[in-house]
Image: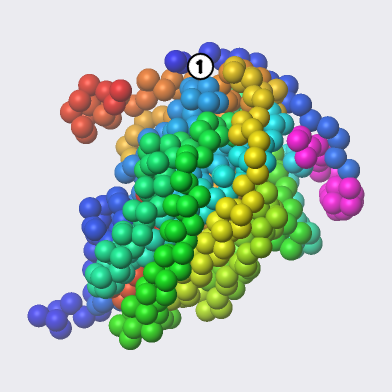
């Protein structure tokens, strides 16, 4: 039977309902034996026209919609959008709001990386990690829930600052989470970092060079795993990140294993930022003076934040009316995913699963 | 909530002059570049035909090696209706620049996918959403919408309630997506 197939090209359709594609990603693989000759990503199954909706809503009305793009890191989405509109109307959030925003954004980075780690390990065949990461992620989601009532699509921030002040017990809860999470991270590493199967499946798989990262516009943990120490929180600090002491973890070989190491270390740095934030939450107002009816002067801004997946940007054009004339979202997942068509070539089919996993996409953001 | 056609807004901006604008004016003396900034963000208005040369110059000489984003804004009442907006970033200077250029409904925009690989998918998205064609793109087809979808939803004349309902009826067997 096999001799018949030798040298023949086989087209394999993977997804959109394949569990390891993390949503509704469809891949058309051209195979020669077990080796991938070419990959084509077919996306858009989750397209909801977010940018068109933005043109039909007021500035404040659109804010909850952005949570539903990368729905596992809604806080970062909301932060980017609020910062963009604030820049457009030349308003700055008060110091207390900025500090709280950073704490929540970092908590969300941890939640996002945890979901990534658990599901990615599951794809590779390490089922245990998922149960641990879900347990810790639950602690973060509980903090979100106590703060604003929502767990995933939090809509935690408002244009100009925050709607809610911190609840009683927030600091204690967050502090105890930080304390226990440091030990948990070590446990994850014990499970995975030196695990021979884990190494075998990830080392040297899906290598992306620094040059390719730049050419493809790759951002976030992916570009840092390829050796480019670029993080918007450091290079173009927003919301007061400049006052925090943290490192930008990098790795050198740009393979799936390095992307794993970078994300693990990023969670440690996030804990550092949160602890510093808790030390210095300033007293004072939580919302700047923002008009109830928002009509920004005609103009345009581009503001981006370091979301867990990479550079999340908003390009907003105002024509001076109640509705944005154009809202463009620069989605990190979409742009990072484009590299798959390059790095999966020559890999084994099973490796494609590992590569998709470490690119860390959320289809809600890829398709918008 | 259809959007009535309005004249293009007059965008607020102020003059922008620094070593970078001087360098660009010297390198492209007859290109008709104009420089401005708004809220501290700098942009160059450039004729479409000059964009590839300008982008290449910015990458090779000024360190703008990172292609952040490409998108389109539609001004249906203008003769040059589509404004292509490109964001470039220089990692070593942590600096951003925006290139804006206008083309007519029927014109083509030169593809940048040969200079920046990132432009490939972003140009496909712009084509999908606005119907802007990119000359020299290796694979210009829809990316987010189905291939047999009719129309380009982010054009201003497209009402949010009047997208391709025929497609929805045919494939999903419901009256409309609304």
User: Where does residue A330 sit, x and y in percent of width and height?
Assistant: 54, 45
Q: Residue at the location (73% across, 47% down)?
A: B97
Please tell me how crowded label 1 is: few (under 14), some (14-19), or many (20+) other residues with Cα within 10 Å: few
B147 displayed left or right of B30: left
A146 and A254: which one is in front?
A146
User: Where does residue A252 sit, x and y in percent of width and height?
Assistant: 56, 78
- Element on which disc 1 rests: loop
A76 displayed left or right of A194: right
Check the image and report above or below for B148 versus A297.
below
Q: Quadrant of residue B149?
A: top left
Q: Residue at the location (42% across, 71% down)?
A: A183
B158 and A234: which one is in front?
A234
A42 and A168: which one is in front?
A168
Q: Which residues are magenta?
A: B18-40
In the picture, which quadrant includes the C terminus of chain A?
top left
* Image coloring type: rainbow
B48 and A203: which one is in front?
A203
User: Where does residue A353 sit, x and y in percent of width and height?
Assistant: 31, 67
Q: Residue at the location (43% across, 37% down)?
A: A148
Check the image and report above or below for A238 versus A350.
above
Question: Which residue was labeled with disc 1?
Answer: B3
Q: Is residue A17 magenta?
A: no
For disc 1, the chain is B
Q: Residue at the location (15% across, 83% down)?
A: A3
Check the image and report above or below for A125 versus A362.
below
Q: Is residue A160 visible?
A: no
Q: Is residue B63 visible?
A: yes
User: Where does residue B112 sit, x and y in percent of width and height?
Assistant: 61, 52
């Amino acid at each position: 039977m096999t001799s018949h197939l030798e040298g023949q090209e086989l087209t394999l359709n993977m997804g959109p309902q394949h569990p390891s594609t993390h949503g509704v990603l469809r891949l058309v693989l051209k195979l020669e034996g077990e080796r991938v000759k070419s990959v084509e990503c077919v996306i858009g199954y989750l397209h909801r026209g977010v940018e068109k909706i933005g043109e039909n809503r007021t500035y404040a009305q659109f804010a909850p919609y952005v949570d539903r793009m990368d729905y596992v890191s809604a806080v970062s989405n909301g932060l980017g959008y609020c910062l963009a509109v604030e820049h457009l109307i030349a308003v700055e959030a008060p110091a207390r709001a900025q500090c709280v925003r950073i704490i929540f954004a970092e908590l969300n980075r941890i939640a996002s990386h945890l979901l990534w780690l658990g599901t990615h390990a599951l794809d590779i065949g390490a089922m245990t990690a998922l149960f641990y990461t879900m347990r810790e992620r639950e602690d973060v989601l509980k903090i979100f829930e106590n703060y604003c009532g929502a767990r995933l699509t939090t809509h935690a921030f408002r244009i100009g600052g925050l709607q809610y002040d911190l609840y009683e017990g927030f600091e204690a809860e967050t502090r105890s989470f930080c304390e226990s999470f440091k030990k948990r991270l070590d446990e994850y590493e014990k499970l995975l970092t030196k695990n021979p199967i884990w190494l075998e499946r990830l080392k040297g798989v899906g290598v992306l060079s620094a040059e390719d990262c730049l050419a493809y516009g790759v951002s976030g943990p992916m570009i840092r795993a390829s050796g480019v120490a670029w993080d918007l929180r450091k290079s173009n600090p927003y919301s007061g990140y400049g006052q925090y002491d943290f490192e930008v973890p990098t790795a050198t070989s740009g393979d799936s294993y390095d992307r794993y190491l970078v994300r693990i270390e990023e969670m440690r740095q996030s804990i550092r930022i949160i602890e510093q934030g808790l030390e210095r939450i300033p007293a004072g107002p939580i919302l700047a003076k923002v008009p109830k009816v928002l009509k920004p002067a005609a103009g345009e801004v581009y503001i981006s934040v370091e979301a867990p997946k990479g550079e999340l940007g908003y390009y907003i054009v105002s024509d001076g009316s109640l509705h944005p004339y154009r809202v463009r979202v620069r989605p990190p997942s979409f742009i990072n995913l484009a590299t798959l068509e390059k790095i999966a070539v020559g890999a084994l089919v099973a490796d494609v699963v590992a590569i998709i996993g470490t690119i860390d996409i959320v289809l809600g953001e890829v398709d918008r | 909530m259809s959007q009535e056609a309005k004249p293009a807004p007059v965008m607020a901006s102020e003059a922008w002059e620094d070593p970078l604008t001087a360098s660009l004016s010297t390198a492209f003396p007859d290109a008709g570049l104009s420089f401005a900034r708004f809220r501290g963000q700098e942009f160059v208005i450039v004729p479409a035909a000059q964009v590839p040369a300008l982008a290449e110059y910015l990458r090779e000489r000024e360190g703008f090696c990172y292609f952040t984003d490409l998108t389109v804004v539609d001004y249906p009442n203008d003769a040059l209706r589509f404004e292509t907006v490109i964001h470039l970033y220089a990692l070593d200077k942590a600096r951003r620049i925006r290139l804006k250029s206008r083309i007519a409904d029927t014109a083509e925009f030169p593809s940048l996918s040969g200079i920046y690989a990132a432009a490939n998918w972003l140009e496909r998205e712009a084509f999908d959403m606005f119907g802007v064609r990119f000359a020299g793109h290796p694979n210009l087809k829809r990316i987010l919408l189905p291939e047999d979808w009719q129309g380009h939803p982010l054009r201003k004349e497209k009402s949010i309630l009047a997208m391709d309902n025929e497609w929805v009826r045919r494939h999903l067997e419901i009256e409309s997506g609304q």
